[in-house]
Amino acid sequence: MNASFANKVVLVTGASRGIGRGVALAFAREGARLVLAARSDDRLAEVEKEVRDLGAEALSVPTDVTSPDAVAALVDEAMTRFGRIDVLVNNAGIGKVGGVESAGFEDDVRQTLQASLFGMIHVTQRVLPILRRQGSGAIVTMSSVMGRKAFARFGSYAIVMHAVSAFSDSLRQEVADSDIRVSVIHPALTATDLLREAEEAEMPPPFRHMTPLSPDDVARAVVMAVRRGRRRVVVPRTANMLLLGEALSPRIGDSIATALTLRPIAGLLGMSRGRTYHETIATRASA
């Protein structure tokens, strides 16, 4: 175990699986004490055991972040147990696939807003006064590459991820006069359960042959962002080309997004190296 975050208290939402689990274990290896929040009691207990097996302290609190009362109870339990919170990682959220013309699009936006944006706001508003009293801390918000560039058939998710990015940018400036650091993470497609229920043909076209990042790749980026005070991290770095093109011109951004639907081009950029998202998820489930 490293000790660069020794005795720091790290609260992770959405900690029962995927990126949240990876983040919890990564900070545990750094010597941190973990507060784990998620809706699934059983999976949360499994992650707590994994954290303890790494020699780190852990407190798991089953929490629905869309409930302000549940979030208040989470933060109260964390403070009762540890007396402080040093790092907040806002990771809880969902994603829906479907075109703008689909009957369920508006409901998809509403559900994603509640889970991925308003849940994050609830937790941040509870934790931020604690960080201000302490005079230091870090807040990490989990957005997506689609928090800067939307893809077809993933509009509901992109709308919310853009909002998450804006929230992070605004918050960072509001706390600029303190020693509270704010980071936003923009991962590309990652091998989590976010899109498990989507048929391969329903996926945004560039995603259909992409090789996803592992949750551990993203977890390492989170730890690095907190350690170095990085304001914005894009994973993998090659995805910055897409975001730069979008910043220069929507026409360029759209052209790059279209080019990524071609497997040879995605492969040239290191974003299609073998197994697709669904192949990766299926292999992991059978392991």
Image (cartoon, helix red, strand yellow):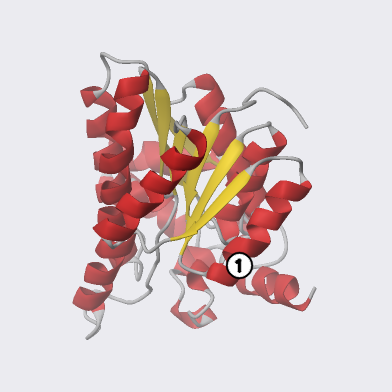
List x then y, in percent, for residue 161.
Answer: 32, 52
Q: Nearer the viewer, residue 149 or 108?
A: 108
List x then y, in percent, for residue 210.
Answer: 59, 61
Looking at the picture, does residue 124 appear above or below residue 133?
below
Looking at the picture, does residue 234 appear above or below residue 6?
below
On the question of residue 143 being in view, the answer is no
Q: Quadrant of the N terminus?
A: top right
- Residue visible at 68% across and 31% down in the picture: 31
Disc 1 element: helix
- Residue visible at 47% across and 61% down in the picture: 38
List x then y, in percent, for residue 45.
Answer: 62, 63
What residue is shown with label 1?
Answer: 43
- Residue visible at 76% across and 40% down in the picture: 55
Q: Residue furthest bottom?
A: 103
On the question of residue 138 being in view, the answer is yes
Q: Quadrant of the C terminus?
A: bottom right
